[in-house]
């Protein structure tokens, strides 16, 4: 595993080098940055902004170092300015990215929320990913286990999961396998690196 809980498996997609650590890893384990016409550094969470880009590992401590050591200027080969709260802004963008993907999965029938529905999917081996709110009851979360060879995501709050499912709060959710599930896992792993958490108290298997 690389920093931020991201796998070092390089078989999926091009690799890029982090300007702080020098470590080469798949793009989905990194955050891309570009300089705007105003000379300000902008995070390119979607990886679609034009221009020369540099990459930093999706890890709060490493991102903070990139800011404090002014490493963006060296990587972008120009003088740049950095807005206050850049790393916090990246975290917010990643939350929105994960929430949007979960919402798409819900609308396509590939995701469910609620203890009973999630338990049913787990019992039927339909679930590939178990999600549980970081601020949910540890006792309640311990009653559900990650699918065998599946994934566990436990660093979104109940409010954030609620946004994805059109509810005020959600504690338990599950996704089936498929393209959206893979993207949810990748984006959630990037978010995990930005959050000072051990991923919640849910149990993992596989």
Image (cartoon, rainbow, N blue to C red):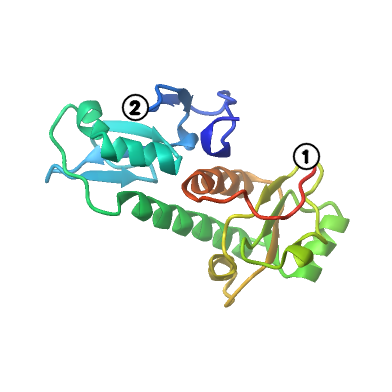
- Element at badge 2? loop
- Total marks shown come to 2
- CA neighbours of label 1 inside 10 A, class few (<14), some (14 to 19), many (20+): few
Residue 32 at x, y = what percent? 35, 37
- CA neighbours of label 2 inside 10 A, class few (<14), some (14 to 19), many (20+): some
Quarter assignment of residue 27: top left
Mark closest to the chain's N terminus, 1 or 2: 2
Residue 98 at x, y = what percent? 52, 55
- Element at badge 1? loop
- Residue 195 visible here: yes
User: Could you tell whether 178 is left or right of 95 in the image?
Assistant: right
- Residue 110 visible here: no
Q: Are marks 1 and 2 in contact (CB under 8 Å)?
A: no
Q: Which quadrant: the C terminus?
A: top right
Is 11 or 84 nearer to us in this picture? Answer: 84
User: Could you tell whether 85 is left or right of 164 in the image?
Assistant: left
Quarter assignment of residue 9: top right
Residue 19 badge: 2
Is 101 or 144 nearer to us in this picture? Answer: 144
| Residue under the point 18% across and 45% down | 40
Is 53 or 181 nearer to us in this picture? Answer: 53
| Residue under the point 55% across and 49% down | 188
User: Could you tell whether 204 is left or right of 67 in the image?
Assistant: right
| Residue under the point 57% across and 64% down | 157
Outermost residue toward the right in this view: 123
Residue 52 at x, y = what percent? 24, 31
Q: Which quadrant: the N terminus?
A: top right
User: Which residue corresponds to mark 1?
Assistant: 149
């Amino acid at each position: 595993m690389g920093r931020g809980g991201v796998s070092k498996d390089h078989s999926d997609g091009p690799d890029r080098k982090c300007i702080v650590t020098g470590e080469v890893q798949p793009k989905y384990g990194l955050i891309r940055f570009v300089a705007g016409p105003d000379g300000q550094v902008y995070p390119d969470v979607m990886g679609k902004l034009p221009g020369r880009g540099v990459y930093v590992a999706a890890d709060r401590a490493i991102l903070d170092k990139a800011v404090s050591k002014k490493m963006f200027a060296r990587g972008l080969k120009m003088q740049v300015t950095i807005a206050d709260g850049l790393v916090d802004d990246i975290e917010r963008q990643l939350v929105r990215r994960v929430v949007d993907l979960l919402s798409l999965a819900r609308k396509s029938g590939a995701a469910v929320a609620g203890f009973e529905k999630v338990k049913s999917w787990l019992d039927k081996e339909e679930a590939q990913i178990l999600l549980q709110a970081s601020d949910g009851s540890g006792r309640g979360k311990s009653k559900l286990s990650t699918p065998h060879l599946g994934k566990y995501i436990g660093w979104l709050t109940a409010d954030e999961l609620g946004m994805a499912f059109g509810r005020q709060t959600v504690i338990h959710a599950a996704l089936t396998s498929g393209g959206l599930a893979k993207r949810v896992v990748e984006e959630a792993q990037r978010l995990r690196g930005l959050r000072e958490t051990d991923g919640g108290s849910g149990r993992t298997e596989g």
